[in-house]
Amino acid sequence: MKLLEVKNLKTYFFIHDQEIPAVDGVDLTINKGEVVALIGESGSGKSVTSMSIMGLIDSPGKIMEGEILFHRNELFTDNLLKKSDRELQGIRGNEISMIYQDPITSLHPMLKVGDQVAEVLQIHKKMGKKQAKREAVEMLKRVGISDAEQRADELPEKFSGGMRQRIMIAMAMISNPKLLIADEPTTALDVTIQAEILDLLRKMGQEEDAAILLITHDLGVVAEMADRVCVMYCGKIMEEADAKELFKHPKNPYTQGLMECIPRIDDDRRKTLQIIEGYVPHPTDFPKGCRFSTRCPKVMDRCREELPELIEIEPGHKVRCFLY
Amino acid sequence: MKTEFAVNLGKKIFYQAIVLVMILVIILIASGIPTDFNVYYEYGQYHWSMSLEEVRLNIFQHFQGFLSGEIFDVVIAGESIGTLFRSAFVLSLKVLFGGTVLAFLIGVPKGILDSRKRGKSGTFKLLQSYIPLSIPDVLTVGLVQFGAIYLYYNDITFFGLGPIHFLGDESWLSTIYPIISISILPAAYMSRITASTIEDLYTKQFIITARGKGCSFGQILRQHMMKNIVFEILSSSPTIMAVMFSSLIIIERLFYYQGLGYHLIFFFSSYSLTPEQASAAFAVFIMGLAFFYYMLFMGFKGMKTWILPKIKES
């Protein structure tokens, strides 16, 4: 059952009279309880997509067109882009939650962590401060904060990066959201902590039956977590497929390039690491045709002139490329 | 660690006490110069209205009178200088305190409105804060007085208070206009501080997290920003206070409100007092004002340098 449908989402930024199409016609579907990974290089529009879903795009950014359909249940569907800010406040943190890349800066430095977690319940469940705090302590225990009763009264500076990300997860999951957006949740963390946080995310998602939109550029994380993967490049979805299928049979030359970049433990050590040649084009200077045409090893004349559509080549496998 | 802190604090207080004593001595010397002392140019030559020996003697007597406390007993218009100073000090304190409270009550909400209107009618809103900051304070006070005169002569009243006279200090109502006048500049200042703090905080990741939790602007403001706003305003309090003290003299003089500032100008310019009376009274008032300002300034500065960072750290 579909939970969230993003249709033709266009989010542009207007800086110094220049139009920057950060997200340019993105289509995305997330089903109930599913883990969807949105991958791509830095600047490909992953985070802007997630912020658009949350309704947190500020000036100079603007959502130009599209639909974000949130299926509350079989009967009720809301287009989040038609909602007022007040209505969105009732959805944010309640039905759709988000955790961010940097747990160090995501928590208010002058507020106790317990209060920051409890605030969600006070806003959305209209709980009293004491009851919300009790629930927050329970949630902190669930995400693995030891001595939660005492530590709930401490400021974020007393916690390590990994612990702070656990607190962020507690904050995001305390209201039992239907969708959790995790924007590069392990990027700022020590490698040894990353697996713990991913495990916790997966466990919490399963326990609460929440869908997860996982934004990352770490293909290892994707392989570990995702049911389905969408590959973004320069504001467009280049390929979408089941995770296993995508890793086994990447179709788009960009996805293939990404896969080849992953170093493997059994690789010949003398072999040079693969890279995708060239640079990501500047957002104000995207090529006329396919956005990847300036770097694609299989580029054709047509690619430079026309933008290919995202077409379904197999059930559940969509590709944006003239080769298919 | 605590001992080191105490030693550092002690040193600072000692240095500041020396600075305060130096300032007071300089003021006492300056105010000890007789008010009828003059240097003039006549027939191609400079002349002194009295000998330097007389000036030196006057300064010396001034010091003696001040240190023995006799200076406070000098009688002016039937009241001792000490009594006059106390009543004037209370009047000035009312204006300063009322002005601070009013400035906070106007400035913070105005700053909040300015920051929220950014990109809409922002430029006009911003100008409302910039105009009072950019025009001379005497003009601001003059405009308030002009409004007060207009209201008085047209019998326009608010909240059933009746017509408020635009001069004097007979009733508590007379404090209203000086308070309004003294609060305008600090209110504009606080408004800019509030607006810029909100603008600055609004892009911080923890505020984005709060918005992501579903907090409304009001909740973000109360729970996540107010501490920072108050911190910023308190950090700027030495500057705000300097602005208020400089306005105090003008305001009290223009509104004929007999606080410290009014008396300072009166003593210096009145012909109804003997030079000795004027000099003694001026010395007491200027020393009192300087001492009061210095203590307040150091209190706020100490809070900015020592207490606020400690609270932030803890």
Image (spheres, coloured by chain):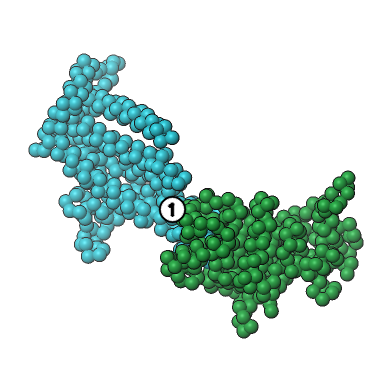
Image-based side of A21 in relation to A85, left or right:
right
- Screen quadrant of the N terminus of chain A: bottom right
Residue under numbered circle 1: B227
Quarter occupied by residue A67: bottom right
**Amino acid type shown at disc 1:** Lys
Of A290 and A101, which appears nearest the observer? A101
Image-based side of A103 in relation to A110, left or right:
right
- Screen quadrant of the C terminus of chain A: bottom right
Location of residue B305 with respect to B47 vertically, above or below: below
Residue drawn at point x = 15 percent, y = 35 percent? B81
Image-based side of B235 in relation to B46, left or right:
right
Residue B286 in sight from this viewpoint = no
Residue drawn at point x = 35 percent, y = 49 percent? B140
Q: Secondary structure at mark 1?
A: helix
Location of residue A133 with respect to B13 vertically, above or below: below
Q: Residue furthest front?
A: A147
Of B47 and A192, which appears nearest the observer? A192
Of B219 and B50, which appears nearest the observer? B219
Q: x, y (%) of residue B152?
A: 23, 58
Residue drawn at point x = 17 percent, y = 53 percent? B171
Q: x, y (%) of residue B255?
A: 24, 47
Residue drawn at point x = 53 percent, y = 66 percent? B214
Chain painted green: A
Q: x, y (%) of residue A86?
A: 51, 70
Q: Residue furthest bottom?
A: A75
Of A273 and B255, which appears nearest the observer? A273
Quarter occupied by residue A172: bottom right
Q: x, y (%) of residue A101?
A: 63, 56
The tint of chain B in the picture is: cyan
